Image: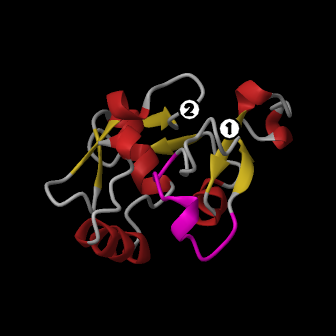
Amino acid sequence: MFRRANGCCEYCRSQAQFAVQSFSIEHIVPRSVGGKAELDNLAFACQGCNNHKYTFTQARDSVSGVVVRLYDPRRESWREHFSWNGDFTLILGLSATDRATVEALQLNRAPLVKLRWLLYQAAEHPPMDAE
């Protein structure tokens, strides 16, 4: 899992090497709603994203007001759904699904934004695969 995810959370792109908490294997479709413990339903996630996602598979897009499914890192490419702002501190969702994911998983929570800024200053962020 770690290798497949290039050592990063598959949602917020936080790098495990700089994390203060261990990462976990997250069920994209939770087992409580029928998700299987199979590779195509598992994602490498930081504790923050895993906790915020919990058992959710959908969230409301704040722009359209529509309830949409959350981003699926097994079936979708991060680069096609998200981008960085100019200083690489904020993740921007490119569609309703992506905006809802950013909000539901709180991909721009304050500690992450601060860490991204520090890592960017040290030329350690963004991860190469998410530029």
Q: Assign the magenta stretch its main secondary structure.
A: loop
Q: Determine the secondary structure under disc 2.
A: loop
Q: Residue at x 43, y 58 (%)?
A: 107
The residue indicated by pointer 2 is: 72
Q: Residue at x 51, y 47 (%)?
A: 11
- Residue type at mark 2: give it: Asp
- Disc 2 packing (10 Å; few <14; some 14–19; many ≥20): many
- Residue type at mark 1: give it: Ile
Q: Residue at x 52, y 38 (%)?
A: 70
Image coords of residue 80 (percent x, y): 34, 27
Nearest to the observer: residue 73 or residue 5: 5
Residue 23, by quadrant, is bottom right
Label 2 with label 1: CB-CB less than 8 Å: yes
Image coords of residue 81 (percent x, y): 35, 32
Nearest to the observer: residue 76 or residue 2: 2
Q: Residue at x 46, y 53 (%)?
A: 12
Left or right: 107 with respect to 30? left
The Cα–Cα distance between marks 2 and 1, rounded to whole angstroms, is 7 Å
In which quadrant is the N terminus drawn? top right
Question: Is 100 contained in the magenta span?
Answer: no
Q: Residue furthest front?
A: 123
The residue indicated by pointer 1 is: 28
Image coords of residue 54 (percent x, y): 69, 55
In the image, residue 114 above or below residue 12: below
In which quadrant is the C terminus drawn? top left
Q: Residue furthest left?
A: 86
Left or right: 59 with respect to 96? right
Mark 2 vs 1, N-terminal side: 1
Nearest to the observer: residue 22 or residue 110: 22
Q: Which residues are magenta?
A: 11-22
Image coords of residue 75 (percent x, y): 56, 22
In the image, residue 90 above or below residue 64: below
